[in-house]
Image (cartoon, helix red, strand yellow):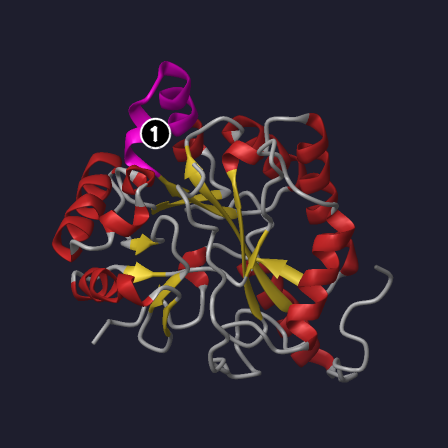
């Protein structure tokens, strides 16, 4: 892909100190810099989210200049096979991400315990809640009991010491923020509302890199770059200029998948059209739920 957002960006001239302040703001807030502290479905296909009205944000958002698009790299189901490979790619590219952890995976083996420690110690990584049980991979049954779903997330929160309460539902693309309310499969509505009532900031995704039948990344980084471009060009993000990207740790076990993710991130960086942030920096995510 040789060009991003043809015809959409407007040339802007900034004078003197305005340009300096804008550039400084991008550098300080972009988490491309390390010193910022911080199962497939059973019989169902991974559901695609319905198109919903987008939430616009102020073009003068201090976190980035108006010509930049923000990408939130998120990885589910860790610590798992591939977690260590994921960290190597992020370290190599010096780019941040949010890891949505499954509680039971953190204690499944010595390797997973060690990987959890690596995740916690890496300043590029933000940890978030992906439930304790991952619905035991029986999603329909899991979401029938809203109270049990909330309890499952509470167990993961306490056992993993996740205090921010950013969460993603297993097997569902659900959003429950003050300004975004999306439920991909309506039978999950009560559980989603229960999580919101319990104070969880539930986030889904805008684009997923799915697996092949061999549970490796399906397709090429070029194809994914085209999808990123298309989402922004066609205004398909939940929030304008902000794209939440999803894939899974366990798809990063083979050399080809690791290289494809690495090239995907590298070319996004080199395009100079994007900045990367953690989910806690998503617009309005930290507003008190009401």
Q: Position of residue 236 (x, y in %)?
A: 58, 74
Residue, disc 1: 105
Residue placed at 15% from the left, 47% from the top?
Answer: 151
Indicate the secondary structure of the residue bearing disc 1: helix
Quarter of the image where the N terminus is located: bottom right
71 vs 6, left or right, is left
Q: Position of residue 5 (x, y in %)?
A: 76, 73
Q: Position of residue 71 (x, y in %)?
A: 58, 60
Q: In the current view of this chain or complex, which residue is farthest to the right?
A: 2
* Region rendered in magenta: 102-117
Tell me which corner region of the image, top left, top right, bottom left or bottom right, holds residue 201.
bottom left
Tell me which corner region of the image, top left, top right, bottom left or bottom right, holds residue 99.
top left
Tell me which corner region of the image, top left, top right, bottom left or bottom right, holds residue 12.
bottom right
Residue placed at 27% from the left, 63% from the top?
Answer: 187
Answer yes or no: is residue 158 visible.
yes
Asked whether 170 or 212 is in front, the reply is 212
171 vs 216, left or right, is left
At label 1, counting other C-alpha atoms closer than 10 Å, the crowd grade (few under 14, some 14-19, many 20 or more) is some
> What predominant SS class does the magenta segment belong to?
helix
Q: Position of residue 262 (x, y in %)?
A: 70, 40
Seen in the picture, residue 200 relative to 105 is either above or below; the reply is below
Residue 217 is a magenta residue: no
Seen in the picture, residue 227 relative to 116 is either above or below; the reply is below
Quarter of the image where the C terminus is located: bottom left
């Amino acid at each position: 892909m040789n060009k991003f957002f043809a015809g959409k960006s407007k040339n802007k001239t900034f004078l003197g100190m305005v340009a300096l302040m804008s550039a400084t703001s991008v550098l300080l807030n972009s988490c491309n810099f390390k010193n910022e502290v911080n199962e497939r479905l059973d019989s169902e296909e991974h559901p695609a989210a319905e198109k919903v009205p987008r939430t616009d944000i102020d073009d003068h958002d201090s976190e980035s200049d108006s010509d930049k698009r923000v990408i939130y790299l998120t990885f589910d189901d860790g610590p798992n096979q591939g977690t260590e490979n994921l960290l190597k790619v992020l370290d190599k590219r010096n780019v941040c991400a949010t890891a949505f952890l499954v509680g039971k995976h953190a204690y499944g083996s010595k390797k997973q315990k060690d990987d959890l420690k690596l995740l916690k110690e890496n300043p590029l990584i933000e940890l978030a809640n992906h439930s304790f049980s991952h619905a035991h991979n029986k999603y329909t049954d899991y979401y029938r009991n809203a109270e049990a779903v909330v309890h499952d997330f509470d167990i993961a929160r306490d056992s993993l010491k996740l205090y921010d309460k950013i969460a993603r539902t297993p097997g569902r693309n659900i959003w429950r923020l003050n300004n975004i309310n999306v439920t991909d499969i309506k039978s999950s509505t009560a559980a989603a509302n229960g999580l919101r009532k319990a104070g969880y900031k539930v986030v889904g995704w805008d684009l997923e890199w799915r697996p092949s039948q061999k549970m490796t990344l399906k397709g090429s980084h070029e194809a994914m770059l085209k999808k990123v471009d298309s989402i922004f060009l066609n205004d398909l993000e939940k929030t304008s200029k902000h794209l939440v990207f999803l894939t899974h740790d366990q798809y990063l076990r083979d050399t080809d998948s690791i290289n494809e993710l690495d090239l995907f991130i590298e070319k996004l960086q080199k395009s100079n059209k994007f900045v990367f942030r953690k989910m806690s920096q998503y617009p309005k995510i930290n507003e008190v739920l009401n």
